[in-house]
Image (tube, grey):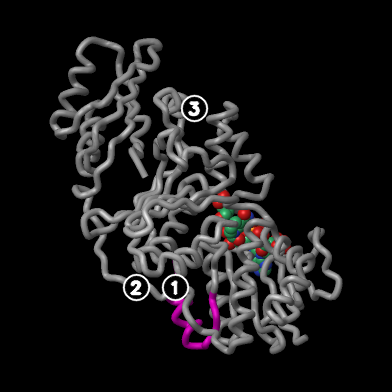
Amino acid sequence: METINIGILGLGTVGSGVVRILQSHADKISSITGRKLKVKTVVVRDMTKKRTVDLDGVTLTDDFEMLINDDSIQMVVEVMGTVEKAREYIKRLLEAGKHVVTANKDLIATYGPELTKLAKEKKCDLFYEASVAGGIPILRTIVNSFAADQIVSVKGIVNGTTNYILTQMNQNNVAYEEALKDAQELGFAEADPTNDVEGIDAAYKMIILTQFAFGKDITLDDVKIEGISKIQLSDIKEAKRLGYNIKLLGVAEKVNDHITISVGPVLVPQTHPLATVINENNAVFVTGVAVGETMFYGPGAGELPTANSVLSDIISVTKNIVMGITGNSFNDYSHEIKLATPDEVKNPYYISLIVPDKTGEMLKLTELFTNAEASFKLITQTEANEGFAKISIVTHAMTEAQLLKIEEGLKQETDVELLAAYKVLEKG
Ligand SMILES: NC(=O)C1=CN([C@@H]2O[C@H](COP(=O)(O)OP(=O)(O)OC[C@H]3O[C@@H](n4cnc5c(N)ncnc54)[C@H](OP(=O)(O)O)[C@@H]3O)[C@@H](O)[C@H]2O)C=CC1
Ligand SMILES: N[C@@H](CC=O)C(=O)O
């Protein structure tokens, strides 16, 4: 049986999983692809680090040129992270005619179109299934199984770290910092977890999902982003009392003939399937005109689940090499669609505020909402301490423009503190 030599860039959480699965599932992989897949060279940063995988017969190096200069390596798996360095390396690998598999959403969301174009020119494959929702095969599902349908919305819990933190806060009263530390130790968080907790990682994934589901290339500037670092346990508890779980949700949906993309904390009704997704699990809820509502669920981060998605790409590349059909884009869908404006996008909101506990404050608040032509569905005073009260409001559906007007009005009220303004999900 012929051998295909593979190079790997990075041997951390995901890279170690890739090596492990290639070794332990070798027979099945060969029987499916008709080729023996051999990890020939692994590039890391720190040669002194102790490795947890069997590297017998594998060259371990910190010299990237060993991949470029080795003509026997046909495919390279990039699982080292970073944006600019990874871009430079992948461009050079594609220029050298090597197929590339990556799990790097930061890179694909930022430079995907450029790298896809180069891969096509060089007749190389460039696949990145693991870049969105870890172990869930969502990108191929959209490409293949939604090919003929018209997707109207994609709502996803697409970051394992934040879902883990929110679950621990909600179910076990664990403090935010402690839950984040656990997520880092479990290998879910990025090397620097800022992108996880500030919603950037989820936004990168929504950029890729938007490209696949709606055929539109967007950038981070097109996504309204809010993370979970400012969420208060009291809001999680209040939402729970009202029948919701707070989730960091990525939403890409059609509004009229336009599209809106956001990432932020959302109150999800406890009866909605997305509310049941706990810990590092992810779920992507896709609604199509023909198929209706579907949900794809599974582990969104971690060594073996993510490596399994990388392996699905490695196998696709191998099959394409065998059939001589490399160089086709992962996703060919391209469609002209404009971004929705703030006065088109409507949602109910959960708003929590600290207000002075004195006569007339509620009247001022009511006037502010009335000026924005917004109305309360529910209003509760949840706490009252030392002259201040905490107020939680659930509004009827209103536009982002109306919300902005309310937020501007609240800023003028110097003794009022806006703690949260989160969307409320009503239905699928
Ligand atoms: N962890 C997860 O659950 C998931 C991760 N991903 C993505 O997969 C990629 C890898 O993540 P993960 O495995 O968690 O990351 P880790 O931090 O665990 O591992 C990164 C690896 O890359 C190596 N590395 C970093 N920079 C360089 C460099 N300049 N040159 C050579 N090697 C380098 C490191 O070397 P050394 O070991 O010597 O320090 C390390 O082995 C990222 O893009 C991440 O976003 C995607 C889905 C899920
Ligand atoms: N840090 C990411 C890892 C997978 O993409 C997450 O927590 O989801």
* 421 on left or right of 200: left
Q: Quadrant of the N terminus?
A: bottom right
Q: Is residue 395 visible in this depiction of the protein? A: yes
Instruction: Provide the residue designation for mark 1.
Output: 331
Q: Which residues are magenta?
A: 110-126
Q: Earlier in the sequence, mark 3 or mark 1?
A: 3
Q: Secondary structure at mark 1?
A: loop
Is 376 above or below relative to 407?
A: above
**Could you tell me if the residues under marks 3 and 2 are in contact, i.e. CB atoms within 8 Å?**
no
- Towards the viewer: 188 or 69: 188
State the image coordinates of residue 239 (x, y, percent, origin top left).
42, 28
- Crowding at mark 3 (Cα within 10 Å: few <14, some 14-19, many 20+): some
Residue at x-position 67% and y-position 70%:
9
Q: As displayed, is residue 385 above or below residue 32?
A: above
Residue, x 28% and y 58% (percent of image)? 259
Can residue 191 be seen here? The reply is no
Cα distance, mark 3 to mark 1?
Answer: 41 Å
Q: Nearer the viewer, mark 3 or mark 2?
A: 2
Which residue position is annotated with label 3? 233
Find out whether residue 116 is within the magenta segment: yes
Seen at 41% across and 54% down, the residue is 286
For the stretch drawn in magenta, what is the main secondary structure? helix
Q: For the residue with label 1, is its CB less than 8 Å from the closest atom of ligand 1? A: no
